[in-house]
Image (tube, grey):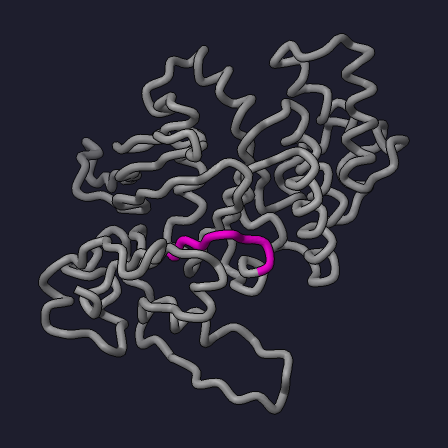
Amino acid sequence: MTAETLLRVEDLKKYFPIRKGVLQRVVGNVRAVDGISFTVRPGETLGVVGESGCGKSTMARTILRLIEPTSGVVEFEGKNVVTLTKSAMREMRREMQIVFQDPYASLNPRYSIGKTLLDPMEIHHLYTPAQRKQRVAQLLDKVGLDPDYTNRFAHEFSGGQRQRIGIARALTVNPKLLILDEPVAALDVSVQSQVLNLLSDLQDDLGLTYIFVAHDLSVVRYISDRVLVLYLGHMAELTDADELFANPLHPYTRALLSAVPVPDPDAKRERIILKGDLPSPANPPAGCPFHTRCPVAMDVCSKEVPAWQEVKPGHRVACHLYQ
């Protein structure tokens, strides 16, 4: 790991066992995440995109060990998160936090907002009681909420306000890395832009590093420095956001970009319609995982897994078209 690398993920895998019979024997595995590798630099935003079921959220939770990985390395500032003891992992959680997709389910309805924000600081023994209350007010103000809201409960807020509270909760312990698991997917479009602007401002003010998981490519383009495209638990493409949108190499990436709505009603774009459904991760196809739906598939695609290679400086892709 270099000084320019905050997080390094190498060959990360997460398999969920399939059990059958009275004895619940393992008869197979759901390969939700199957060999993902990337690095994240301090202060950057890595966008992660793909269809529903491609392993984005599982990957995010596995990095934080909210789900235990099957194998692989997750190295944060030189420490392998996968091998940390329970007490060491507790300390590490101060450095890496998550904002969940659903602002309605991620807040405890029995807790006031003040208690929701106080709890992480109490658990990690941060600040004095008076400083904690002061910090709660500061965080609410920082995410655009009235500090007087501390005695209110989650049901008294809108979806956008709840997501702001979720962001404030993640910031209570001064993390360096925030994993944002589709943080605007459940919000109205107008509220989405407000939350995205808030995240950009917080990143500039606090020097945060983001992994931004989403399926909306227009959102990813707005906030990301680099973009990782996933398909069926595998990496398809990784490059700078501007390069990805200007020159997508993988056929799957091209299909995703062709589905992005264009605001001009007179503009014409060739849609790439993928045939069939996403294959089951419990029984993935041999060779390239995308070959069953790929419009330019060749014979070799069904037999050999394409190598993960750098086609251009900083532009990696897994596709036999570039072998």
Residue 126 within the segment the image draws in magenta:
no
x 44%, y 13%: residue: 88
Q: Most extreme residue toward the bottom, as rendered?
A: 266
Position above or below: 129 against 92: above
Task: Indicate left or right for 277 with 302 as reference.
Answer: right
Question: Which contiguous range is marked in magenta?
Answer: 222-232
Task: Indicate left or right for 84 with 31 as reference.
Answer: right
Q: Residue 70 appears in which quarter of the rendering? A: top left
Position above or below: 64 against 27: above
Task: Indicate left or right for 77 with 187 as reference.
Answer: left
x 45%, y 11%: residue: 87
Measuring from the top left, give residue 52's x and y in whole percent: 43, 58
Q: Which of 17 and 31 is in front in this view?
A: 31
Q: Nearer the viewer, residue 41 or 269?
A: 41
Q: Which of 170 and 279 is in front in this view?
A: 170
Measuring from the top left, give residue 68's x and y in whole percent: 36, 29
Q: Residue 190 appears in which quarter of the rendering? A: bottom right
Quadrant (top left/top right/bottom left/bottom right) for the N terminus: top left
Residue 227 within the segment the image draws in magenta:
yes
Q: Which of 101 and 306 is in front in this view?
A: 306
Q: Tell me if I can see residue 231 in this picture.
A: no
